[in-house]
Amino acid sequence: MCSRFREGGAAAGQRGRSFAALRMTAGAVIVLVACQREERNFSGMPPSATSTMPAARESGLQPGPSVRSTSINGPYEQNAYGVAQGKTLYNAFNCSGCHFQGGGGIGPPLMDDEWVYGSRPENIFETIAEGRPNGMPSFGGKINPDQIWQIVAYVRSMSGLLRKDVATGRNDDMQVRSQEQAADKAKPVQSALPPSAERQ
Amino acid sequence: MLSLLQQSHSVLNPSSPQTRLIDRLWDAMYFVSAVVFVLVVLALLLSVFRRRDSEAAETDPGQERSLTTAVSIATALTVLILFGFLVYDVAVGRQLTRGLGKDALQVRVIGHQWWWELQYRDSVAQNWFTTANELHIPVGRPVALELLSTDVIHSFWPPTVSQKRDLIPGKDNSLWLQADTPGVYRGQCAEYCGQQHAKMAFLVIAQRPDSFASWLAAQRDTALTPTTQPAIRGQEVFLASSCVMCHAIAGTPAGSRIGPDLTHLASRRTIAAGTLPNTRGNLAGWIVNPQSIKPGTRMPPNQLKPADLQALLAYLETLK
Amino acid sequence: MSAAAAPVPQPPPAYEDQERVRRELEQTWAQPPGLWHWLRSVDHKSIAKRYIVTAFIFFVLAGLEAATMRAQLARPENTVLGPDAYNQFFTMHGLTMMFLFAVPIMEAMGLYFVPLMIGARNVAFPRLNAYGYWVYLCGGIFLYLMFFMNTGPDVGWFGYVPLSGPEFSPGKRADVYAQAITFTEIASLVGSVELIVTIFKNRAPGMTLNRMPLFVWAMLVQAFMILFAMPWVATATQFLAMDRLMATHFFNPAEGGDALLWQHLFWFFGHPEVYIIFIPALGFVSSIIGTFTRRPVFGYPVMVLSMIATGFLGFGLWVHHMFATGLPQLGESFFTGASMMIAIPSGIQIFCWIATIWSGRPRFTVPFLFVLGFVVLFIIGGFTGVMIASVPFDQQVHDSYFIVAHFHYVLIGGAVFPLFGAFYYWFPKVTGRMLSERLGRWNFWLFFIGMNVTFFPMHQLGFEGMPRRVYTYLPETGWGDLNLLATIGAVTIATSMLIFVINVVRSYRVGLPAGDDPWGGETLEWATTSPPPHYNFEYPPVVESRSPLWDTTGEMPVVTGLRTDVRDTLVTTLLDAEPDSKHRHPNPSIWPLLSAIATTILFVTLIFTPWGAVIGTPLFLLALLGWGWPRGRDKREQQLVESEA
């Protein structure tokens, strides 16, 4: 292959070089992707955080959105460790109490393609931090922003919005759903109102 | 600075009947092994450096015969020694696993990444309580430990008071221990369990029965209601911030079981699973950025306003 | 294979014939220079040399990892490595030493010297042999590429579930762990099949089983142990990969799996693994002691039976790695008994060697020094091994630095010291030049002292409660001084390794010419030139005793009748090595390399996507097809057939 390029004169040589450059770039991309997937971020600060949380909340009532997360593409979207942490927190903070293992119940399902308040990471961040009408409490100030980002990444992985090599496998629990790695990408669809709101 | 330890925590400095048995077993094995080692190395050196007749035949049948005898005797002695070890060892093993008396104290030890949850059991359910990382036991009374894990495999090992036993998810293990002399004995997780395996220590605090009883009574109480102004504010901060998502304080709405129970935090000697002495400064540093002390630990950093932090510390210090 | 006229022992042919035969053999078995031919080589010597060099490079890498860890542990609360990096380092150190250094290099020594010692032209399946090496190389490169991409395994070489399972090891690190083991599995299984068949069917006429050199016996026992041990870890790692990638529940207690199942499977391989590394070393020691005391090793039958006994007993000890898991006491006592029993054959062998030295005339060469060092270190490791066979004592020191000390005494003292002895002993045979004895003595003494300074204090650290696999420790624990001492020892070992590398590089270029038999050895490898020709021997020698080179006066009888214009080899019977038939060996081929690459593509892509099977399997089948495609006769053969007609 290479020798043919060499024999083929200047034009082919050019092509050979750009081919090599392409391969090197591809290699570099693979390396970077792997690094991002495997990184363990222990600082506890989201890599590109722009918002600070009010430290402590006085009561359950609170004014409108004070946290405006600019369009940060969630810091853990490509980080397997962050997604796994998100999964642990999802269960630990009892998100499963309402959303169950993604199938929904009291709260809307998270593993389907329907999104009431948007499927982008910053939308989900706001949903968790600020709460939403009809039952979603606000966790800003109670959950560290970094951990919210981890939960965001995990929630997105439930409907296959993350790469499969980043999403989590099964837990050492009773199996109630297939592992997130196997979730096929559910193309997000805007849904008008949550079912609970419709009933009212 | 407060020293974490009052005594050496070596296997060779036993403070309990079990570890003493094992120490004696070690002494015996060490002594025999040392003698045999010296003999074998002497034989080796002698065989290398012994004077040789320059004209002797290459292989002398008489010599071969005596060598055969020597090798046979050495082999027979090896077998005998090993058999002796085996018998002694099984005898010690039987003593270590003999049944407990009825009066054993029941404690459930649950391993977490990377701390120890301790649940003290009692025939009266109201008397149950949970603490973390410091196992208080009465001197001279057997303690039955039930060893569980909720995540990965850990191993419970306080060298001076007990041998080790793994905490395996899905498998209930048990271990009994008993301390002879009052003291503070250090132990550490002995099974690799992830990022902070190195900082998953605990203390075994052996107390005289009366002081243990008063400790027990104090632990069974719920937390004191704060009375001073900063402490009252501190409790508000605790209940309104991320602390409450993971920690429990009996007597308050905080009831999460994800992190260590903080009901009597101020009565503990260390924080962060035996990593830091429990002082106000260390506690503040730990709350603000635990990741700088135990990178990878499950507790996130907390960006509290300075006044809130001081109030929180004041509150935590009241949790005797 | 043709059952044609079985060759018979004959006196060596006349000189002119020998010249012609040599030329023809040279032409038939030649490996022409150039990369293309290098990639196609099926010569056991050139493949084994690559194996040894590659494994040594991995040894150096693993050593550098160890040195970095020692730097981190030199002081309490040190910051050379964080927990994340440290965990990858200690895992890579263990994995590399066990799977990429120890087992491959021991097998490689066998693949190089077994055919020479039994008078064969090559190993039994030369292309399979090449395939084994390429798979091993690809696996090693894969593991280290992943390591440099921050995807190095961080679950320990023992990879206990659930820590290595899907819930607690996110990302691909643990998948890399599982798959890297699969690679080296294949390579070692291939090597063991090679060795077994070669030893059973390709021995020189007259080399009955009871005349086989002890080294060959050691390799035979080791090969059988690999054959029976490795499938278990392959099973375990496949279970793990399936748990992680396909959500099976082999190790999930909540769904009827069992976390301890992994430990049983792993240690059922993991304990024999120790003997897989150690038994070849016994072979090196016996070879070296025989040569340098100028007498056959004392008690040949007992030595052989001891090795076989070790091979069997090695499979009955695995539970002593699990004494702290709370298994029933009676069961544990059984494994205590078995673990103590295995000390008996080891003891017998040490006594026999001492008896050999006693009645022989020792020469203080560097290989012999390494053997003396081996005996001393191995006894220490052996004694601590007997101690930790005791359940109560092990429940104290298990997973503490006492264990780290114990198995480094066994593995470095018991296997690496003999290996270095073997390097000094056989380097002249492989390269035709002697290693420097002066540098060799420096190498030995620094290694011996460094080894003890590093690992002896660790016994005490274990007693003081220092667990294994900790990335740091608190100053209050008081472990700092002994750890610093251990780090100083590690620097000493590193220095001795540097001296060894200098010695090899220098001697390879300007060392004293060795001649065929520089040490006056007893076994057949010293009968051929240094380095040996591609065809090893002009005629297969006929063996009439255990020490053919010492017992034969004058010319050694040989077998004639093998063709020199094609790659004919002699096949002999299993027990008595009577000439049985001839076997046509394959020519060099690129297909083993291509098959190995296809295997690699299959394994690596499978980690990332199930489509890996769809891509990789046809590729591999295609490569096998190419490998096995009938090519008919080659040009020379065709001419021959025509001329005969």
Image (cartoon, coloured by chain):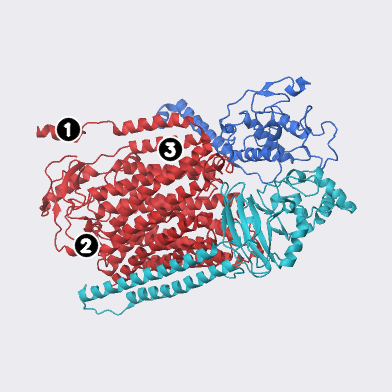
At a point 67% along the width and 49% down the height, the residue shown is B297
State the image coordinates of residue B230 (x, y, percent, origin top left).
88, 52
Residue at numbered disc 2: C547
Asked if residue A65 is positioned above or below residue C485 in the image, the reply reads: above
> Which image quarter holds the C terminus of chain B?
bottom right
Counting from the top left corner in percent of width and height, residue B163 is at 57, 62
* Residue at mark 1: chain: C
Q: Which of the two marks, 3 or 1, is nearer to us in this view?
A: 3
For image coordinates 50% across by 67% down, the residue present is C456
Q: Nearer the viewer, residue C281 or C238?
A: C238
**Nearer-the-camera pick, A144 or C631:** A144
The disc, 2 or 1, on the residue closer to the chain's N-terminal end is: 2
Tell whether label 1 touches label 3 (CB within 8 Å): no
- Point out the tag, 3 or 2, that comes first from the N-terminus: 2
Q: CA distance from mark 3 to mark 1?
A: 37 Å
Q: Are marks 3 and 1 on the same chain?
A: yes
Q: Quadrant of residue C385?
A: bottom left
Q: CA distance from mark 2 to mark 1?
A: 42 Å
Tell me which amino acid carries mark 2.
Ser
In the image, what residue occupies the spot 47% across and 43% down? C237
Q: Are marks 2 and 1 on the same chain?
A: yes
Q: Colour of chain A?
A: blue
Q: What chain letter is assigned to the residue under label 3?
A: C
Chain C: give its colour.
red
Disc sitting over residue C638 in the figure: 1
Residue C249 placement (x, y as % from top left)? 52, 39
Numbered circle sitting on residue C600: 3
Q: Colour of chain B?
A: cyan
Q: Is residue C345 visible?
A: yes
